[in-house]
Amino acid sequence: STREEHPPPPPQTKSPTDVKARPTKKNNHTISFSIPIIMAVIASAIWLCKEVLLTNAAAASKQEHLLRSTTLLKFQPDKFQGANKKKQYFEGWYYKFVTPLTNNHTTAADASPMSMAVVPGIFYGNTPNSNESHAFVFVTLNGERQHYYRFHTSEFTHALGSDDYYIQVGNNRFTHTGVSLDLRPREHDDAELVLQGQLTFASPNPWPISLMQLGAMGPVGWLPGLECTHGVLSFDHILHGSLTLTHSSLEDEVEKVSSSIISFDNGRGYTEKDFGKSFPSLWVWIQSNSFPQNTGTSLFVSIARLPLFGMELPGFTAAIWHNGTLIPFATWSGAKFEDIRISEEEVYIAMRSSRSRRRGYRVEITVDRRNVPEVLLYAPVNFTKMAPFVWEALQARVHMRLFNSHGDVLVDDVGEYAGLEVHGNVQWLVDNVCGKKTASKIICL
């Protein structure tokens, strides 16, 4: 007979009520192991980020060294840029020297207070054979008096090729590491001062360069035919040495001579330059690196109207050098102005290094112009000659407040012996702050 097959009976299961609930136990060992693992991951991530930053910084430093060691003048902004120019061209190096400050924010008691600018350069007139072409050195003392020394163009020499930077005008030599001066008035010079001595520089801090960031000009420096190119050769350095100043004057037809020795030991120095066809038609320039509570901090601001592509546009390049770090505020870096106010009493500027309020830095700058002496400096005029043309102060005071992205105050200090130039119809700059109805629709501040 055929046996009928039946499926096996299902396994017996216990009802939920028959199952005894077991208490859930936390795995303390797992938690205790997780904490150090998480901390190790975080520490590793922080270390990796620091290594990346250090690697990037090292790579940037190496790239800058390689670029500066080439013979391409774009990467050597300190060197003479006009070797092929014979007309409608100027180039000048601006060396500023300030005697040291004491704790009460005045200069040292055993030294006469002094803020001095010494500017060597060369000018070519509107024709190759212009009688106005000449080399020069001018000196301004505390922004109260200028002395202009004129030299033949053949008395101007400069570094060539891979030579270390230097320029020499007559017996006056200027390098990265110092200056040697022997200035004596000659016939037809607009000068009365004999200036002699040597100063040496320690720890200069130039505006860094890279393939696409040509110092203060950034990528704009690559554009051909710029009216004027600006460079910061050292935001701040320490001075050593002294200069002898000898004045001669006629009183009651009797020549009187007075001489003084000014010590610049442990003072602060700053160096910049300009070259091109002409200065802008209007601008504001501010500079100080004599902040009593922030030694080594330096402020530089340049705002101007620039002819570009057949138009006149506002532009600016500015920076703060603080704790060995460059903080740029420039058109090309994405910075923006919040406010500009310019009057006979003060200049006020508020700007951000980034257009985002959550990123970058913010700075407020107030320059006190009251009772500050100014002197009329020589500058290129209409491509034809050098003439007294630009008013400059060297004893202004600039209150700077620098904030980080969180609103924390990084610097709140007053820079002494600030350089200040306010030239032309600067209301045009005020009217071109972004957001104003009068601002340029193409580029605004």
Image (spheres, grey):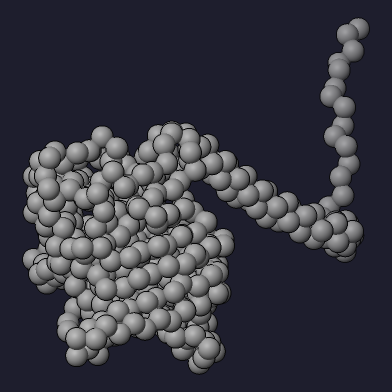
- Evaluate whether residue 296 shows in this view: no
Residue occupying image coordinates x 76% and y 59%: 39
The residue sitting at 37% across, 58% down in the picture is 272
For residue 274, what is the image quadrant? bottom left
Residue depicted at x 37% and y 73%: 116
State which quadrant residue 347 falls in.
bottom left
Q: Nearer the viewer, residue 184 or 114?
A: 184
Image coordinates of residue 191 in percent, x first then y, are: 25, 70
Q: Is residue 344 above or below residue 304?
A: below
Is residue 46 or residue 367 the one in the foreground?
367
Percent across and percent down for residue 199 are 50, 65
Horizontal relation, residue 44 to residue 356: left or right: right
Q: At which x and y percent is residue 159?
A: 42, 41
Please identify the quarter of the rendering in which residue 386 is found: bottom left
Compared to residue 383, the image places residue 193 above or below, namely: below
Report the residue at 22% width, 38% height from top. Answer: 85
Q: Relative to the observer, which residue lies in front, 46 or 109?
A: 109
The residue furthest front is 254
Q: Position of residue 17 (x, y in %)?
A: 84, 59
